[in-house]
Amino acid sequence: MRLLPIILAPLALTGCFSWWTDDTPAVTPSQSNPVDTYADAADGVMDLAAAAVQTARAANADGKPKVVEGELSVAAAALPRPTPKAVKESQSRSKAESTVIWTEAVAKADKLQRQLDDLWGKVEAEKEAARQQLAAKQAELDAARAAQRDLIWTSGGLLIVLLGLAGLVWGSALGVTKPEAALVILGGFAVGSLPWLLESDLSIWVLAPIGAILVVRIGLWAFKK
């Protein structure tokens, strides 16, 4: 037993366990939201109808009945078909020709529109709350994965350190020199601290010398063989 098998065996185990445990699906939101799709379509229809009505009113003031009829036809096509009750109420208002009745109808319509706006505001608030819950769940899942990853690498590093200590104690029986055993221990510390080193700005200054030493030692071992 020499340096290379001692280092590679625990690293192989660590890599296998890392691959095996990283199978938890990520929490991802749905790509298409039916509520948003419906709301966008409804907004487009209402915008088309409102613009047509506004143009028709302006044309009526200018005495252009053909334009009035055309734009009202566009608005009628965009809006949902009225119920018989709503048609009856509208015809009743037209026969009465009462400014008071029309004013009351306008106030009622405005109230209904504000109620719709309030309801949609509640829908948007619920959507935002759901998005925040989803983001919190994803953050929790990411933290659990990171903790699991750190534990695996720390365990692998500890195993390598134990092998290096075994090399120091029973080096002659294992065929490992003390410098090689010390290098194995150093590699174990590097493996165990790898998750933190990768997130640190000093990682390159720590990992590069260790990697260079390992490459040199493995090259010398291969040359001797």
Image (cartoon, rainbow, N blue to C red):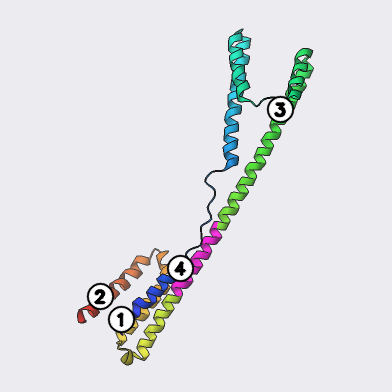
Image marks 1 and 4: residues in contact by CB distance under 8 Å: no
Which residue appears at 72% of the width and 30% of the height? 112
Helix, strand or loop status at disc 2: helix
Instruction: Tell me how far mark 3 sits from mark 4, CA to CA.
Output: 60 Å
Badge 1 density bin: few <14, some 14–19, many ≥20, Cα 10 Å: many
- Upstream in sequence: badge 3 or badge 1: 1
Instruction: Tell me how far mark 1 sits from mark 4, CA to CA.
Output: 27 Å
Res. 101 image quadrant: top right
Q: Is residue 13 above or below residue 78?
A: below
Which residue appears at 53% of the width and 65% of the height? 144
Which residue appears at 43% of the width and 79% of the height? 158
Helix, strand or loop status at disc 3: helix
What secondary structure is the magenta-colored segment mainly?
helix
Residues rendered magenta in the picture: 138-154
Instruction: Tell me how far mark 4 sits from mark 2, CA to CA.
Output: 31 Å
Q: Which residue is label 1 attached to? A: 3
Choose between 96 and 209: the one closer to the eye: 96
Residue 177: horizontal and vertical position, in percent?
29, 87
Residue 138: horizontal and vertical position, in percent?
54, 57
Q: Which residue is label 4 attached to? A: 20
Instruction: Tell me how far mark 2 sits from mark 1, CA to CA.
Output: 12 Å
* Label number found at residue 110: 3
Amino acid type of the residue that numbered disc 3 sits on in the rendered structure: Asp
* Label number found at residue 216: 2
Residue 24: horizontal and vertical position, in percent?
51, 62
Instruction: Tell me how far mark 3 sits from mark 1, CA to CA.
Output: 82 Å
